[in-house]
Image (cartoon, rainbow, N blue to C red):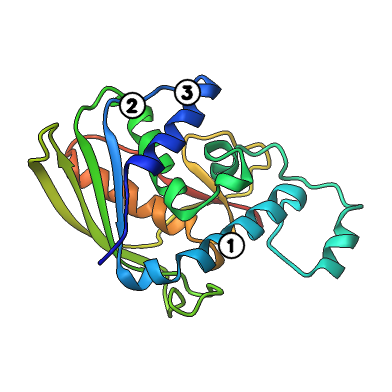
Amino acid sequence: MPRLFSTLAAVAVLAVGALLGTPVFAADVEVNFSSRIDRNMAAINRIEQTREAYFREFYDAYQSNRVASVKKFNISRLENVKWAGQSLIPNIADFTMENLTVALVSESLERAGMADLEGTIRLDIQRLKVSRYSVSALRGNDTFVIGTIAHLDNAGNVLKSVKISTNLVVDRSVDTRYQGPDFAFFTQDSATRVGPALARFIEKGLESLFEGKKFTGVVMIGS
């Protein structure tokens, strides 16, 4: 059975948001991952934390320690970008695929003026592939996500549910001071990290769930 990341994940992320002065949402966010993804969750989270920590230090894709030691003397041109991962999950210890997914949904709702939405947003992620991911269970020829997203009322009744299949189609920018409006990820993340694929899935899922609303997109920054 897929593992349900609901109360604990949502509470953890929203508690961080409250401490930072960001809105606390009326709606809960639940995330189900397929059993195949769930079996590899520990490895996925280790990779994401390692790569995110490296990126926050060097603003570059993960490389060996030998190369990293040289990079310590370089000055990055990308430190002034408002990066999605860094802004949504400030603490590396909290940087997991579960928490990132919850944070992306909550931030997307807030930016769309829906912070007071009641009920629950439930995501069921059935397949997730990232073309050059380090865990074989997620690695594929393309980067895509397949799953469903639903809005439930406070009694648990499904108000609407949509099936979503998204390839990673994103905008690109070389703006070294990018501050929005889209979620910014490093250009190489499209093939090596889960964040861009999840953000794209959430964007299209919420737009299908709440027709007529526009939600935050994805932009890849870098040369």
**SS at badge 3:** helix
Name the spot of residue 110 as percent of width and height, x first: 36, 28
Q: Compared with residue 191, is residue 19 higher up or lower down, i.e. above or below? A: above
Closer to the eye: label 1 or 2:
1
Q: Which residue in the protein does label 1 denote? A: 46
The number of discs equals 3
- Please determine whether, in this image, residue 20 is positioned above or below residue 58: above
**Mark nearer the N terminus (3 vs 1):** 3
Amino acid found under the numbered disc labelled 3: Ala
* Residue 200 in sight from this viewpoint: yes
* Image spot of residue 8 (x, y percent): 38, 42
Residue type for callout 1: Arg
Measure the C-alpha gap from mark 3 to mark 1. Answer: 26 Å
In front: 4, or 97? 4
Vertical comparison of 153 with 116: above or below: below
* Mark 2 Cα shell of 10 Å, populated few (<14), some (14-19), many (≥20): many
Alpha carbons under labels 3 and 2: distance apart: 10 Å
Residue 200 relative to residue 209: left or right: right
Question: Which residue has dot 3 on it?
Answer: 18
Q: Is residue 68 left or right of residue 90?
A: right
Rate crowding at label 1 as few (under 14), some (14 to 19) or many (20 or more) other CA atoms within 10 Å.
some
> Which mark is on residue 25?
2
Residue 12 in which image quadrant = top left
- What residue type is disc 2 on? Phe
Q: Residues within 10 Å of mark 3 (few under 14, many from 20)?
A: few
